[in-house]
Amino acid sequence: MITVSTSLAKPSGYHHGDLREALVAAGLAILEEGGDPKALSLREAARRAGVSAMAPYRHFADKEALLAAVAAVGFGRLREALLAADGRGSGREALVGQGVAYVAFACANPALFRLMFGSAPCPRDGDLDAASRSSFAVLTERVAALVPPAEAADWALHCWATVHGLAALSIDGQFGGSGENPEAMARRVLSLSALPSEC
Amino acid sequence: MITVSTSLAKPSGYHHGDLREALVAAGLAILEEGGDPKALSLREAARRAGVSAMAPYRHFADKEALLAAVAAVGFGRLREALLAADGRGSGREALVGQGVAYVAFACANPALFRLMFGSAPCPRDGDLDAASRSSFAVLTERVAALVPPAEAADWALHCWATVHGLAALSIDGQFGGSGENPEAMARRVLSLSALPSEC
């Protein structure tokens, strides 16, 4: 069945790449409003972008493909946030800054964060994997500058796990009792320094 | 509307506490099969326990109250797993053992773990809070024996975040590429030692 959008927005006014971008933007907005990837449909993304319900299929095979594209944009934004935080310090301070930025990103975008890292209905395609790796690389490069080469990969996992745990526990309300700001708590806890003291 | 169970199991054969326990056991089983707290209903728990659909209301006001009871049982099991692991070592080794046990618990019971720590529809009641605190105490006591008193609370949060991150990333398939056993990976990463080296 083909349904036609009743939106008054220009249904044929998009260039190829623009429509894709508009659909991803609509997907991001729906995700943040609904709080659950299940709340996102290609049909609703099309409605918001002002195109017919069939138009998204020019770019996305199904809803999961759109979710993967949204997650990839999320990893791009996370990478930017980590890079910006890293640039505000050096050494361990830069690493702590990255961790605080990771927690802040999760708290500001909980549904997007859950989509990016959850086992949700989001297939790992090439673009998403590349975006994810590119984001993780900001952390691994900073860690590699701080620890012996042989331990760098494991320390990167260690640091990732710590900041991911702080982020997940924060957005799931597990620190709710303290009432403390999650970023301030993350800065304090991460400043204890998980890295070998000789670094 | 009152519906009567068609089960042949004895509908009136439970003592008061036994029925509650049977319903919680049914809830645990449903959770592990369905993988999602939304898959659990009081009606289905009643059916499995062989009682009428109204019988659960003697113990649980609603589905959320049953979920809270199931989560509390989960924290009791986690506490037992942490204690057992802690008892197999001393000092830092015991702490690493607890971390590995935490990850193993999550991997063996992913749906239960998500219910316990997620922002899912599970109200925090007194029993659940007590069970959660009691479980966390196993970690905090071990940490307190290893670090200066003034830093103990923050180090406990640090260690919790690290093992929670490892657990969450494991059950969400984020380490899938390596194919490594999550417990082995956790042991290696945690053995890097996040605690101050003088401890």
Image (tube, coloured by chain):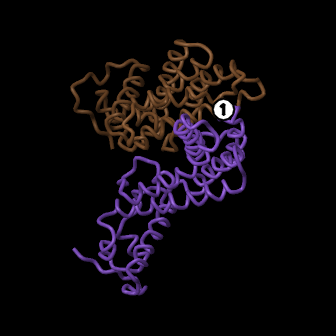
Chain colours: A purple, B brown
Quarter location, residue B87: top right
Left or right: A23 with respect to A104? left
Query: Relative to residue B169, is residue A117 depicted above or below?
Result: below
The residue where tag 1 is placed is A196
Q: Nearer the viewer, residue A123 or B126?
A: A123
Residue B145 placement (x, y as % from top left): 69, 18
Residue at point 38%, 41% (across, down): B176
- Confirm whether residue B59 shows in the render: no
The answer to whether any part of residue B27 appears in the image is: yes
Dot 1 falls on which chain?
Answer: A
Taking the spot 53% from the left edge, 51% from the top edge, the residue there is: A137
Give the residue drawn at x 54%, y 32%.
Answer: B163
Residue closer to the observer: A61 or B38: A61
Is residue A53 toward the left or the right of residue A172 in the image? left
Q: Quadrant of residue B157?
A: top right
Under tag 1, what secondary structure? loop
Look at the picture and state if B167 lies above or below B136.
below
Looking at the rendered image, the quarter that the C terminus of chain B falls into is top right
Res. B52 image quadrant = top left
